[in-house]
Amino acid sequence: MSRVTEIRYVGYGVEDFDAERKFYAEDWGLVEVAVEPGLAWFKTHGHDEHHVVRLHASSRNCVELIALAAGTRNDVDALHQRISEAGCTVVHSPRELSAPGEGYGFRFFSPDGLPLEISADVARLEKRAMERWEGMPVKISHIVLHSPDHQAMVRFFTDVLGFRISDWLGDFMCFLRCNSAHHRVAILPGPPCLNHVAYDMLTVDDMMSGASRLKQRGTDLRWGPGRHTAGNNTFSYFCTPNGFAVEYTAELEEVDFETHEYKVHVPAPRVMDQWGIGAGGPQTMPQPAPDPCLFQPAEI
């Protein structure tokens, strides 16, 4: 079955474009690969994905696009048909893409109105071997979304996009995989919006080194350091200048896409954070609110 295989990038509309651009280039540790007036695209050092962040100067802070990958053009076409049959609003049908990296893809809205893109044949860029203690992101690890009907959204991701369930936290947080990573998407109850975007670091030392760099540059740790149970990954959470939650993570569990069977973890303090020493907590992060760009096609 044709399915989504990876996360490509998240496109943000930001009120303070210059501050967000400076943060990703100088503090977070990404590489600017293209720039136009009011637009910037960034990649990571350690992966060949063309870009993982797109910034667009906007009158409001919002998520303009969440871009996902499929294996081939035929997979893109098959997913377009399945998504159309599921009743989702299609922004545009599969076509040649004109953004940096180009490729072939289509855009649509999730049942909640989040703007999504699925593409194939996007150009790859050079990557380099990362070294321990650099403290720079290797690639996007996962994204977490809120949904007012999270059970229905889980079914959409599994039945329509081809994800599989890796774990549940109680009955309210579902971890979904689209490849060997334990999760690339997780879904929580709440108003339709993005919760955070996480980036894989080479080692736990790199997570800590990156956190140290951010602190020295004026971005405080909101929650962490800690280690989750579902996925067994370490975490440290921060906020960008425009208020978007981002995470450094390391040691995310690898599973067999075909055979892994999910568990239901009973919520408890040491389940959310096995170490139990981290500062802050979920309550220190931006509180979910409906994204202002729901059901609105991105300008670019």
Image: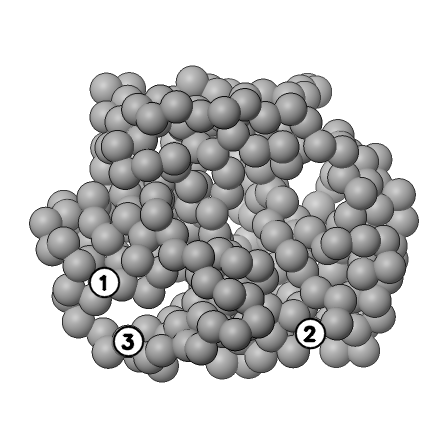
User: In this rendering, does residue 80 appear at all?
Assistant: no
* 290 or 115: nearer the viewer: 115
Q: Is residue 104 left or right of residue 288?
A: right
Instruction: Give how far across and how far down residue 144 sits, in percent.
Output: 45, 58
How far apart, in angstroms, are the residues tagged by discs 1 and 3?
10 Å
Check the image and tell me how it is coloured: one colour
Specify few, some or many for label 3: CA neighbours under 10 Å numbering under 14, 14-19, or 20 or more. Answer: some
Say which residue label 2 marks: 160
Q: Is residue 290 left or right of residue 205?
A: right
Say which residue label 3 marks: 265
Residue in the picture at 43% in, 41% down: 199
Instruction: Give how far across and how far down residue 255 sits, in percent.
Output: 46, 63
Helix, strand or loop status at disc 2 = helix
Say which residue label 1 marks: 272
For marks 2 and 3 on the same chain, the one whose residue lies earlier in the sequence: 2
Helix, strand or loop status at disc 1 = helix
Look at label 1 and name its amino acid. Met
For marks 1 and 2 on the same chain, the one whose residue lies earlier in the sequence: 2
Q: Quadrant of residue 32?
A: top right
Instruction: Give how far across and how far down residue 253 sits, in percent.
Output: 39, 56
For marks 1 and 3 on the same chain, the one whose residue lies earlier in the sequence: 3
Give the answer, above or below, for where 196 lies relative to 83.
Answer: above
Residue in the picture at 33% in, 26% down: 132
Q: Are marks 1 and 2 in contact (CB under 8 Å)?
A: no
Look at label 3 and name its amino acid. His
Helix, strand or loop status at disc 3 = strand
